[in-house]
Image: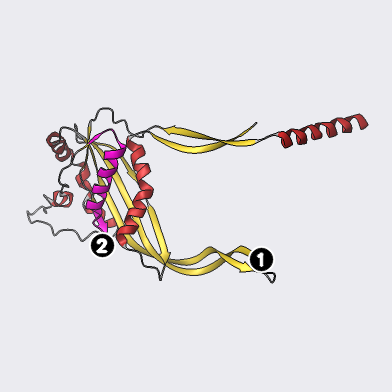
Amino acid sequence: MTARLARIASSFTAVVMTAACTSYYEVPIETPIRPKLDISAFQRVFVAGFIAGGSEDVDGNLETTRLLRSQLRTKSELRVIDADVLPLMEVALEGRETNGGDRQAPPPAIKEDADLEAYEHVFANVEYWKRIGEEYQQPLIVTGTVMFAPQARSGIVQRDQEVYDSFGRRRVVPVRTYMERKGFVLKPRFIFIDGRTGTILHSENFREEILYNVNQTSPALSSYFELMDRLIPSFLSTLSSQRIRGTRILLQ
């Protein structure tokens, strides 16, 4: 028994000495992520426009089209087509007639998700998208919907608060308080269409939100760009390989 305890103590001492002599260092690494969509058959990309709604302070159609075209010019190998944004809402409303031949009243303005349903059939219009593809030399077409709307929320929020003891020493403690907050929510749906056939290749939904204290004012457009900044990497990873940078801890 004594010999066994001696062996255990000796092993423990060896581990402690090894750990004490071990140095740690970080090694930067890059992890490649394959694109979700095979775009090898395309040389051009056409960001055609979006069915957009929510806030009247931001034109989600034009702003999203401009932003995605700008990003694709610098971060994609595809040639970006510069052309007018397609009037998708007008296209979606064409042919809306009742059985008696009377034209239906236009759907209400897009204020919430349910209002998009009246327009979404345009993305399944194979003949329309095939015709657009022929006009622009059969590119990959990017379109979809964009909802950017104000929102308000109230509830218990945890935040850090500085406190000082009687000796003047500073501490940071978590404090739970009831707060009313307001901000914006961004919900785009990106649809990728084959300009050769007019069929949908891939679609993906995203959601991001930002909230501020109720007494804080933030312009809608700046909030929109802040939320889009969060989504852009995911959008680009659909079309091209991306690399995630990080570090690993190695022992020496």
Q: What range is drawn magenta here?
A: 52-79
Res. 78 image quadrant? top left
Which sits earlier in the primary sequence, circle 2 or circle 1?
2
Q: In the rendered view, would you say 45 is above or below 101? A: above
Residue at the image point whose x is 34% and y is 34% from the top: 240
Q: CA distance from mark 2 to mark 1?
A: 47 Å
- Rate crowding at label 2 as few (under 14), some (14 to 19) or many (20 or more) other CA atoms within 10 Å: few
Residue, disc 1: 169
Res. 197 image quadrant? top left
Viewer-side label of 2, 1? 1
Q: Is residue 59 magenta?
A: yes
Residue, disc 2: 57
Residue type at numbered disc 1: Arg
Q: Residue furthest top?
A: 41
Between residue 80 and residue 251, name the one nearer to us: 251
Q: Position of residue 69 (x, y in %)?
A: 25, 43
Between residue 190 and residue 166, name the one nearer to us: 166
Residue at the image point whose x is 41% and y is 64% from the top: 212
Residue 113 seen in the current view: no
Residue at the image point whose x is 40% and y is 68% from the top: 216
Check disc 1 and report its element: helix, strand or loop.
loop
Q: Is residue 41 magenta?
A: no
Tell me if 219 is positioned left or right of 136 in this view: right
Res. 18 image quadrant? top right
